[in-house]
Every structure is written in structure tokens, then in C-alpha cells.
Amino acid sequence: MPTTDVPPITLSASVPRQLDALVVGLAEASDAEILIGLPEDVAKSLSKTTGLEPIALARRFGASAKPGRTALLAGPAGLRVVVVGVGPIDVTPEQVRRAVGAAVRLVAGLPASAPQVVAISLETAEPQVIKGAAEGALLGAYSYRPATGEAAGISQLVLVSPSRKPEARQALDLAATTAKAVNTARDWVNTPANLLYPESFADDARQLARGAKIGIELWDDKALERDGFGGILAVGGGSHRKPRLLKLSYAPRGARFHLALIGKGITFDAGGLDLKTADGMYTMKCDMAGAAAILAAVTAIAELGLRIRVTAWAAMAENMPSGTAFRPSDVLTMYGGKTVENGNSDAEGRLVMADALAKASEEKPDLVLDVATLTGACMVALGERVAGLMARDDQTADLVLDAAEAAGEQFWQLPIPEDARPKLESKVADLKSTGDKYGGALTAAAFLSEFVPTDIPWGHLDIAGPAFNSGAAYDYTPSGGTGAAVRTLIALAHALAN
Ligand code: BES
Ligand code: MN
Ligand code: ZN
């Protein structure tokens, strides 16, 4: 897979002349809807050809201030004018990210004879809003294009803003690096599991990291056996595609904080011998989204040159049923020596994560965060668009929630209640991998917690819901892989860097 690139995005004080599409906003003020960002000459031309005020014309074509609602108008000289609803006029960055995402996604999907130059004109001046607009545009322009795919739909994006401050340009650069990382994670998730498997995934990530100042260490199946990674080996044992553990280290001079990120990289989750149903299995190429998120994030953090040490650990395996698959009731010796009774071969994520968490903790990082499409139970609790966050202390939880808020991603804290751990008692091992049928997201967290020493702050992000959109695209979110958690991880690194 080639490295994902985003179209170039630039700032401009006025709407450029050479343009295929122009995005303007329709916002809700106290008692009226107002058009924002429509230049005088385009407004005049629209009125002249239709005899209507631009806002009346936009309404006739279905526009409203309703967030994400779009209407397409024919402007002068073939210019496509997209009017997008942004909601209340005092916009938040996420409101703008969503609106611009919806508008640019519409343009990217229109038939065109050549790649499109698109300007976004929303009178945005505040750096955080500029960042939101730019991310929305770059995320909305995304589509998964397998190697044989057609040419890119959008060749150039221009953000119209009156701001000349250096902060505006910085916001744009940060947005471009962030969006590129999100789109990289999306591409990985979207690549089908016959084309993306532990070995190829690791090769791809190594190639991506090679462009940045990142140290690379890779455990193949032999090395995993030598070092005793019993969880990763058991889960990967049912597949011909052998498991891998990939470590990417970014350690800039002068960094004071060490963040360890651990990602679930199940390239396909068939459920193992506890085979999934056809419906449940269909989207399971997405089960490496946690690994995709941490690998894309650490690369972006390195590209941005943030002063924070970040070590990313991706535990990669394919969970398949076969004569060499691990069995329900097997007792595994995990990295570090703890024994685990396998309660269900479809609860494979926590096993590969346990090994990687134990290994990552040896370096005594200041914070350990893991990201995983871990449980269907988390989706039952929070739905498809909200990720679960679990932590042993509220300071860690707040750190992640604040970063998510700043990044415009939805996380909700779930508890790790005291009755969760007793459910994991085993008669034949130190602990069992599964609990009972209640609170599955919470028992999974309680299990993971056993593999991080209690003196290291630890948080767990269950992205089973938001990692993959099995429905239609909306706002800046495409169907398929979404790149969930990437923006939050980059924002967190920003907050923790010195
Ligand atoms: N990868 C799944 C969780 C998942 C489900 C992610 C749906 C995304 C969408 C995970 O490995 C799994 O199968 N979990 C089981 C655990 C159970 C067997 C204890 C689940 O949630 O049903
Ligand atoms: Mn599973
Ligand atoms: Zn899984």
C-alpha cells in the first residue's frame, strides 16, 4: 500500500479566481438564517441569473442551517457552489469540521472531468476553527482507492480566511499532518484481510515510519516464541499468516514525558474456534483499527516534532479456526509469566493486548494507553459513534477526555467496578480471559488492567463502535474505516509535550 497523501491545502485572504467548487455556510443566528462567506461577485451573478436573493435560491435547492445539510447551486462559469448548514452561528471547531467535511465529501463524489480545486469560505479566523475546517476538508475528501482505483477527486483545497497570523498557518499544518494520519489509518482498516495481514501490515508501518525519526523493532513468530509472548502466539496460531509485534519508538531530545501506546492489530477476527456468525464476521477486517490508530498517530507526532517520547506497540495476529488454533479452556503463559485460561477464542483481543501491555510496561512509561476494537459489549452500551474509556484513576481519564474534546472525538467513561475482577477467577490459571454475559466491556478492562503494574497510570480506549462505519458516510466520516482515536492521540501528545 502506498503512503496515503492528502491534497495540498493553502490559506488565502480572498476567494481565488480559478476554482471548480466553492463551499459557503448557512448559519442560524438569533432569529434568522444567514449566509456566510459568499463573495459579492458570486452573489450578484446568482441573483442575476435567477432573480432570487442567494439565500432564497439556496433554500429553494434544499439548503438550511441544519448541521451537515448541503445544497448544490450552479454559479457563474461552471462554478459549483455548495451551501452547507453549520448550525448555530457561534461555531465550535467540531461543528465546522463536520460541516466542511459534508460539503467537501459532496464535491469529491460529483462527476468531474478533472480533479477539482475547492475553496472553503466561512469567514473563519480563529486558529482552532481554521484547524477544524481544514481537517473537515481533508477528511471529507478521503475515499479508499485500492491500487487500481481512479484518479483523486480533489487536487487542491483553499481555505479562505481573513487571518494573517502565523497561528493560522500553524493550525493548517497541524490539520494536514493530523488528517493524513487519520486517512492512513482508514486505508489500513479498509484494506481487506487477504491483502493486509500481520507481516504485510508490519512492513507497511515500517515503511511509513522510515520517513520519520522513528526507531523500529519487529518480533516475528520465532522471536515471539523466544521471548515468551504466549498470548500473541496462541491467537495467531490458527492462521498461516504468522503473528508479529511491532514497536515504533519516537524519542526526541529533551522530551520529559514518556507515553506508551498499545494497539490491537487483529487483521481478521473470525472468532477462532468460537467462530463468529456470518453477519458478525463480515466487518472483522476492522479489528486492527487500534494498531492502525497508534501507528499512524506516532508517525504524525514524530512528523510534527512534538517534544514527547512516544513508544507504539502493535500486536498483530489473525484469529482463525484451524487444527492449530488455540482452544477454549487452553491455559496460556503470557509475556511476563502470568497464566490465563482461555474462556472464549473470540475474546482474542485482550490476549494479544496483555502481552504487549506487559512488555510496554517494562520501560516504566509515564502513561500507558491502549486502543482496541475490544468488545461488542461496548457498542451495546454506547452505540456505534461513541468510544468507551476506562482508567484506574480519574486524572488519566480526564486527560484522555480533554484530549478527545479538543480533537472533536466522542469518548465516554465507563467504570471498572470492583465486581469485575472476581468474575475472572480461574481454577486452573492465574485468571480467566472472560467473565459472564454482563458488563463485557468492563471485565475486558479489568483483565487488561492485570498486565500493567498499578504504579503506572493506564487507560483503555475501546473503539469497537466508532472504528468502522458500516452505514452510509456522514459529515467527514466515510463508510468503512474511520481513523477513530488518531486525532485524540495526537491531541493528547500535544497536551503532554514540553
Ligand atoms: N473484535 C471483537 C469485538 C468487536 C465486535 C469489534 C464488533 C467491533 C465490532 C472482539 O474480539 C470480540 O469478538 N469480542 C467478544 C468477546 C466475548 C467473546 C467475550 C464480543 O464482544 O462478543
Ligand atoms: Mn473476537
Ligand atoms: Zn477481535
Image (spheres, rainbow, N blue to C red):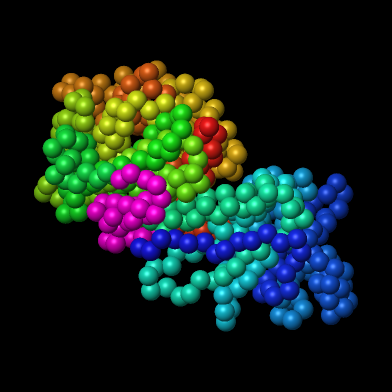
Q: Is residue 191 shown in magenta?
A: yes
Does the image show residue 331?
yes
Q: Is residue 221 above or below residue 283?
A: above
**Residue 367 in the image: x percent, y percent?**
42, 28
Q: Residue at x 17, y 45 (%)?
A: 221
Q: Where is residue 343 drawn, in percent x and y?
A: 23, 33
Residue 73 lies left or right of residue 241; in this view the side is right
- Residue closer to the observer: 244 or 497: 497
The residue that appears at 53% across and 32% down in the rendered structure is 498
The answer to whether residue 26 is seen in the rendering is: no
**Which residues lie in the magenta part?**
189-216
Percent of width and height locating residue 217? 27, 43
Count how many numbered circles sit on residues in the image. Answer: 0
Decide: is 127 above or below 227.
Answer: below
Q: Is residue 2 above or below residue 94?
A: below
Query: Which residue occupies the extreme left position in the image?
Result: 323
Residue 35, picture quadrant: bottom right
- The image shows residue 244 at horizontal and vertical percentages of 24, 46
Residue 177 is one of the magenta-drawn residues: no
Instruction: Using the image, determine if residue 277 lies above or below residue 11.
Output: above
Q: With 250 as the anchor, is 78 left or right in this view?
A: right
Look at the image and tell me in which quarter the N terminus lies.
bottom left
Identity of the residue furthest to the front in this view: 253
Q: Nearer the viewer, residue 443 or 294?
A: 294
The residue depicted at 57 percent of the width and 75 percent of the height is 115
Front-most of residues 47 and 139: 139
- Residue drawn 21% across and 27% down? 336
